[in-house]
Image (cartoon, helix red, strand yellow):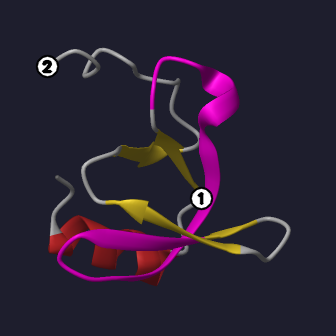
Amino acid sequence: MISEELLDQYRVEGTLLRVVRDADPKNDVKGIVVAWDDETVMIRKQNRRIVKLDRNHHYQPFANDRDIGWIGR
């Protein structure tokens, strides 16, 4: 689960994130952190739509290569 501190850092810096939900890259979500609570994170996509995602997904800066090594743990 992503920490409060890291989410706040991404929100303040406006870091573009990739949310890896499974092994298929087509299911990734690209956007910036808007808000979060204990279980979910709200991400604003480039088309300005807001999606609510589980905090247990893998959040990483979009500039980094896609990391799926965490899948299956």
Tell me which numbered mark, 2 or 1, is placed earlier along the sequence.
Answer: 1
* Vertical relation: 49 (above or below) 67: below
Residue identified by numbered label 1? 16
The 10 Å Cα crowd at callout 2, few under 14, some 14 to 19, many 20 or more, is: few
Residue placed most toward the observer, 47 or 13: 47
Label 2 – label 1 distance at C-alpha: 25 Å
Residue identified by numbered label 2? 73
The image quadrant that residue 37 belongs to is: bottom left
The image quadrant that residue 73 belongs to is: top left
Left or right side of 15 for 41: left
Q: Position of residue 45 (x, y in %)?
A: 71, 65
Left or right side of 49 for 68: left
Q: Residue at x 33, y 45 (%)?
A: 57
Q: Residue at x 57, y 68 (%)?
A: 32
Q: Position of residue 2 (x, y in %)?
A: 21, 57
**Residue numbers of the magenta segment:** 22-43
